[in-house]
Image (tube, rainbow, N blue to C red):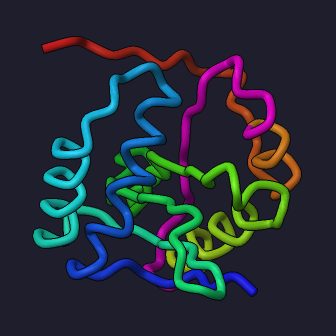
Amino acid sequence: MTTIRPALPADARLVAPLFDAYRQFYGKPAEPDVALRFVSERLANADSAIFLALGDDGEPLGFTQLYPSFSSVSAGRVYILNDLFVAPQGRGKGIGRALLDAAAAFGREKGALRLALSTARTNTTAQGLYESQGWVRDESFYEYSLKL
């Protein structure tokens, strides 16, 4: 049975390899030191909420990371579900779904109006999971970014 729980600062070394693999999925090189530093800082500073999926043996199998934000139009808190990753050995076992459920429960507990996410257009597996969980793809707005 998989356990989903909030990650603590002491869990950075469990989350970091998953985070590094997640970054590699999106085309970044393996950088374990960068991953550990980034995850450690987020957890130490409470900049984000990270949920960790652990197998029966304590093996880290997945994580999701949410960043707090606000909606001016809706005048309320939202969370950006920025990262969701399940290790290959954990796939097909409902871990992604359980992490999404934990994220939604967290958002409700914090009084958020909604969760938001973006994913690669080619990541159809994730899109299917999101839509099966009630997430609705935005067809009205484009997403832009400015590289600094």
Measuring 68% from the left and 30% from the top, which residue is drawn there?
138
Measuring 51% from the left and 62% from the top, which residue is drawn there?
63
Residue 93, percent from left and from top: 82, 65
Q: Left or right of 100: which side holds 27?
A: left
Measuring 17% from the left and 45% from the top, which residue is drawn there?
33
Residue 5, percent from left and from top: 50, 84
Q: Left or right of 36: which side holds 23?
A: right
16, 117: nearer the viewer: 16
Q: Count of labels shown?
A: 0
Q: Is residue 113 magenta?
A: yes
- For the C terminus, the image quarter is top left
The magenta span reads: 107-126
Q: Left or right of 32: which side holds 112?
A: right
**19 over 45 or under it: above or below:** above
Q: Left or right of 37: which side holds 92?
A: right
Extreme front residue here?
57
Q: Is residue 77 magenta?
A: no
Q: Quadrant of residue 104?
A: bottom right
75, 17: nearer the viewer: 17
Q: Quadrant of residue 67?
A: bottom left
- For the N terminus, the image quarter is bottom right
106, 55: nearer the viewer: 55
Residue 85, percent from left and from top: 57, 50
**21 over 76 or under it: above or below:** above
**65 over 25 or under it: above or below:** below
Residue 94, percent from left and from top: 81, 66
Q: Quadrant of residue 13?
A: bottom left
